[in-house]
Amino acid sequence: MTPPMRQKLILVTGLSGGGKSTALRALEDLGYYCVDNLPAALLKEFAQQVKSNPSRYSIAALGVDARSPAIDLEEIPAWLVDLETSGLECQLLFLTADSKAIIKRFSETRRRHPLTIDQKSLPQAIAEESALLSNLQRKADWVIDTSDTNIHQLRRQVWKCAGSENEAMTIVLESFAFKRGVPQDVDFIFDARILPNPYWVEELRDLSGRDAAVSEWLEQDESVRGMQSDILTFLKSWLPEFQQSQRSYVTVGIGCTGGRHRSVYLVDKLATGLGKDYKNVLIHHREMQA
């Protein structure tokens, strides 16, 4: 008899401006039930809710930041050990970045650093937060430095961390616009710019490849159907080789001019086709989420 799968809880923390919110959204893409900015003192209660509802919270993630009292932050490592002992698999993900990168990020947004109180400067707040969270960083299972990382690269890194122990290979299908550059860390790239472009049809221009009118328009063209079939055949032929070589993560990029019509349509269709054979297929429409 196969033993039941252990429930999993990932605690996400780190420096403000380090990418915690992006990391939680990436975990949501993997099916995690995510809660952000819960006071550290409520971690035990949250964990009990998770444990008491295994079907609903088989995998969950919790975001905690330095606004929690220092005494509660200090107790987190011990709490995680207790939760592990009780049967809940717990892991700690820490997001960090250098001061220069964090200052630049806060200068580009209206958000205030949570510790900039009592006329404290931003560099002082960053230093204080780093000291408050230093023990959690040392105890973390994964530490991701986002100083030179954009949100798309961070999402991939989080997926790799959370999915590294999965037996099933994870396939990421990403649509993008060539005019904004080719994504980094992709294993395959396919160019859909040779296909008919719905952008030049006035009533379709403001829609996307996810709209039925665009799908129907594209599907009327033999070249669209042919490219979709050829890419799917290629991937079905070669993805098993990646899986046998113990690759846990493969990224496929589909690009067009604007990244909203043809590439989006193809990514969604390929996801449906591959979903029949692979459990973990993730979709990322870069230009629609930027």
Image (cartoon, rainbow, N blue to C red):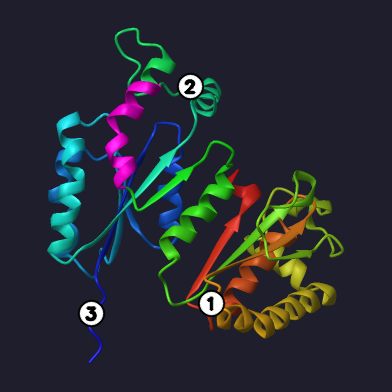
- On the rendered image, what quadrant is the C terminus found in? top right
Residue 133 on the magenta span? yes
- Image point (58%, 57%), residue name: 284
Q: Residues within 10 Å of mark 2 (few under 14, many from 20)?
A: few
What segment carries the magenta color? Answer: 126-139
Residue 143 on the magenta span? no
Instruction: Give, as a three-letter code, the residue at label 3.
Output: Pro
**109, above or below 56, in the image:** above
In what element is the residue under mark 2?
Answer: loop
Pointers 2 and 1 in contact (C-beta within 8 Å): no
Q: Residue 45 carries which label?
A: none
Would you name the residue on which mark 1 appears?
A: 246
Quote the CA–CA distance across marks 1 and 3: 24 Å
Would you name the residue on which mark 3 appears?
A: 4
Quote the CA–CA distance across marks 2 and 1: 44 Å
Would you name the residue on which mark 2 appears?
A: 110
First-in-chain label (1 vs 3): 3
Instruction: Give, as a three-letter code, the residue at label 2.
Output: Arg
Quote the CA–CA distance across marks 2 and 3: 46 Å
